[in-house]
Image (cartoon, rainbow, N blue to C red):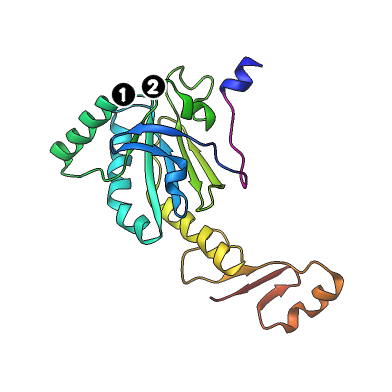
Amino acid sequence: MENAQQFSFPRLNEPAPAFSVRTTHGERSLEDYRGKWLILFSHPADFTPVCTTEFIGFANAAPKFAEMNCELLGLSIDSLFSHLAWTRNIKEKFGVDIPFPIIEDIKMDVARAYGMVHPGAADTQAVRATFFIDPNGVMRAMVYYPMSNGRSIDEFVRLLQALQTSDTHGVATPENWCPGKDVIVSPPKTAEAADKRATEGYNTVDWYFSTRSL
């Protein structure tokens, strides 16, 4: 029971766990991001090479995320002073400003609530977890990477574009969908609707598989 409490996981399409934390940009809470998308992502430790490349990638993509009404928020269990020293080092050595806050989570309260610390991975380090939280505070996607391998920031941009497209147009998106490609129309739910599908003007391969342009 103790381990079950320690390593809890949020669930898709349910409210994301609330938090109120100290960050490199001051106090932050989940409620501060109401009305915007939020990408909350954890890293195992400051001053590590893979994490450094990821933070540079997130920083470079920050304007694109901002265009999509999305904020970025990092986290590790390192101290606020470690975060500040690391971001200053990235500026000095790589010429990149880190524009988003980083949570100080020394007691691992947020890491545990979001399932960022996995048994067997490390006792005191968060794996590379990434959470997409919508403007209503609902968990919409979760992506986990091992500590040894960096994330694809381009994929997170693509996934956010796909989520927003599905919300706006009531459609699904196919494998590796990118803006400009056709989207998937929901399959009919009755025999009568299935019979009519071929006449509805979609690109229909069969009654259950139809696409359309936006």
Residue lying at 23% horizontally and 31% vertically, measured from the top left: 84
> Which of 47/132 is in front?
132
The correct choice, above or below, for 166 with respect to 39 in the image is below
Determine which quarter of the picture holds residue 12. Answer: top right
**Res 68 visible:** yes
**Res 47 visible:** no
Quadrant in the picture for the N terminus: top right
Callout 2 amino acid: Ile
Callout 1 amino acid: Ser
Mark 1 secondary-structure assignment: loop
Determine which quarter of the picture holds residue 201. Answer: bottom right
Side of 122 where 197 appears, left or right: right
Residue lying at 42% horizontally and 55% vertically, measured from the top left: 157
Residue lying at 43% horizontally and 20% vertically, measured from the top left: 107
Q: Please provide the residue range marked out in magenta.
A: 7-14
Side of 67 where 98 appears, left or right: left
Residue position for label 1: 79
The answer to which of marks 2 and 1 sits earlier in the sequence is 1
Side of 134 where 172 appears, left or right: right
Side of 6 where 193 appears, left or right: right
Residue lying at 44% horizontally and 54% vertically, measured from the top left: 36
Confirm whether the magenta stretch covers residue 169: no
Residue position for label 2: 106
